[in-house]
Every structure is written in C-alpha cells, then in structure tokens.
Image: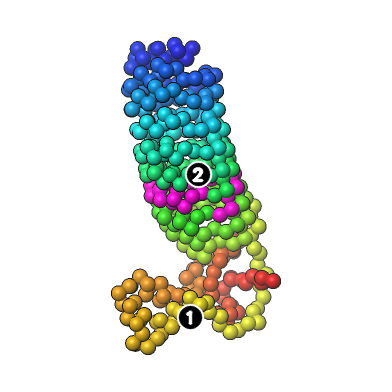
Amino acid sequence: MADALVLRALRGNARHLDLSGKKLRRVPKAVGRLFELNRLQLKNNLLSDMPAELQALSNLTELNLGNNSFETLPEVLKHLRQLRKLHLFGNKLEALSPSVFECLEDLAFLNLNNNKLTTLPEEICRLTQLKYLTVNNNQLESIPSKLCLLQHLCELHLAHNKLKSLPHDIGFLTNLKKLSVPRNKIQVLPEELCLLTNLKVLDVAGNQLHIFPTKLLHLKLEEFYYEQNPLLEKDLIFSTQMKEVLTLQEIAARYILNGPSGNSLTKALEHYPEARKILDHASLCAKISIVSPVHVVPIRALLCSYKCFNESGHQFYGIAIP
C-alpha cells in the first residue's frame, strides 16, 4: 500500500506525501526521489530509523515522525537543512544528538512531547530561528541555560517533567509570550522571570511554589495559572524589631553614594551611569514600587525597614523562619 502511494507521488512529482498509520517498519527508499517534496507525514507507524536516501529531500520543510519507535534522532535529519517544522512526539527518545541540531538552523517548530528525555543538549541554542518548543511529558530534571539564547522563542512548554528550577538566564528570552511549566517540582521562580515583558501566559500550576518573584505584578499577563501550589498564607503580626537592618550590598551602596567627594568610587560612577542607576534604587521600598494590591498571590518584596512594615495601609506580611 505504501509503495503504491509513493509510486503515485513519483508520477505526480508530489509536494506532499502522507504515509501515516501504515504500520511501516521502514520508509521506502524511493521517497528520496521526491525532490520537490515539502511535507512528509510518517506518524503512527513502527519506525525506528530512516534511510540515508532521504537526505536528498532538500526542499522538505515539514516532517512528522510522531508516534513511532525512535530511540535516537535519525542522523539523516542533519541533511534536511530547510526543515521548519519537526514532530517527534510519542517516541522513545532518551537523549538528543547535538550534531543534528547544529544543522537545523531554520527550524521554527519542535515537538518532543511524550518521550523519555532527562535533559536537553546545550547545542539546542543552535536552533536560532526556533519559535515554538514543547517538551511536555518527559523526565527533564533541568534545562540548559543556553536554551535562553533562543531570541526568537515565543512559546516554551515543559509540563509534566521533574524540573526543580528554571535558569536565571530565562530573562534573555525577551520574545517569550507563553511559558508553561505545570506539574513539575519547581520550588522557586527566578527574579529574572519578571524581565519577560512580552509574556502573556504563565502556567506554573501544580508545583511546589510558596511565593512569587518581587516584580511579578509588573508583567502584563493575560492568563496566569498557579493553583495546586503550597502558597504561603497571611498571618498578620506586628514586628517587635524596630531597628533598620541593611544588607552588606545596601551598606556599600550608601557608602559610595554618601561618601566624601574625593572618594574614587564616587568619581568612577560618573563614567558608569547604569551602575549609578542601580545604586540610586538600592533602597527602593516595595510599598512604593508595587502598586497593585496583593490578595491571593504571595509576592516576595523588600521593605526599607521594620518601622515601614508596621505602618498601616499595605497588605505585606512577614514570614517567621525558625
């Protein structure tokens, strides 16, 4: 049946070939002669490898290998340099070959759902045009920081894995619009998450989060899912400590800004406006910077003093750590 479909495609110089659900254990080598082929559907078969003849498909832009039996990435993929969409969901992949990623520079869509991946190679950053990445239902314990170099990434899906954290470099994904990491083991979200100014959808449901980053409310989210997390609850008390407690960084910042005019560090700051900007906001109180009321979602914040905390007119609360 498959051979007949391939023969018909050869006669018609086809641009699209669908061999899905044919119980194939091998791909007919004649497919490699379909030089004008743009889309190749091979999902729902029994494939575990692909013939080298397919490297001749230089015009192929979409390949669907979903629901097969691949344990490793077929090496022939590295020759399909025009690929833009690649489906590999529902296979038995435990690792990904870095050498394949080095050649798929035009890939924009990658579906790796329902495999057995425990990690992603750092070379995934070579997929410089990637916009959509989904790795749901795997066994990922971490994701490489270099993934955050994918400047065009718009959607990142990592549901149902074993992630305990997200890299601090996630703030570099400036075009990210949707981040979905539900049903993991994430305990803390990095503050850099709040740098994702284009983020519209954030799903962190079913993790182990107690509190959220300081500037989360600055994000213009359209959808925010955070249910089934052990969030901290308010238990309002007045602090008995009235003395202002400063961090070493704050003390150093104040010394530099308020130091004598001959201070070499003070003079140096004239040449580094960004550093001065940071120091100018070193003691910015959360009561000033956070304007939205916090009702249900606990947000991590820094107040300038215990005296400020004890004043009325805010909804901040302290956590006593034994």
Q: Is 191 placed above or below 173 here?
A: below
Q: Left or right: where does residue 68 sit relative to residue 255?
A: right
Residue 108 visible to the viewer: no
Residues tagged 2 and 1 counted as in contact (Cβ below 8 A) = no
Foreground tag (2 vs 1) = 2
Residue flagged by tag 1: what amino acid is it? Answer: Ile
Q: CA distance from mark 2 to mark 1?
A: 41 Å
Q: In the image, is residue 155 part of the stretch drawn in magenta?
A: yes
Q: Nearer the viewer, residue 286 or 171?
A: 171
Instruction: Residue at 52% x, 65% y: name it.
Output: 214
Residue 120 visible to the viewer: yes
Q: Quadrant of residue 94?
A: top right
Q: In the image, is residue 306 part of the stretch drawn in magenta?
A: no
Q: Nearer the viewer, residue 127 or 176?
A: 127
- Label at residue 231: none
Q: Quadrant of residue 62?
A: top left
Instruction: Residue at 53% x, 72% y: name it.
Output: 302
- Label at residue 120: 2
Mark closer to the chain start, 2 or 1: 2
Quadrant location of the C terminus? bottom right
Prevailing SS of the magenta stretch: loop
Instruction: Residue at 33% x, 87% y: name it.
Output: 262
Q: Nearer the viewer, residue 50 or 39?
A: 50
Give how far across and how far down residue 274 sits, in percent. Answer: 35, 70
Which residues make up the magenta segment? 143-165
Q: Quadrant of residue 7?
A: top left
Give how far across and how far down residue 175 sits, in percent. Answer: 40, 51
Instruction: Residue at 43% x, 44% y: name it.
Output: 123
Give how far across and how far down residue 126 sits, in percent. Answer: 39, 44
Q: Is 36 placed above or below 312 here?
A: above
- Label at residue 251: 1
Residue furthest to the right? 322
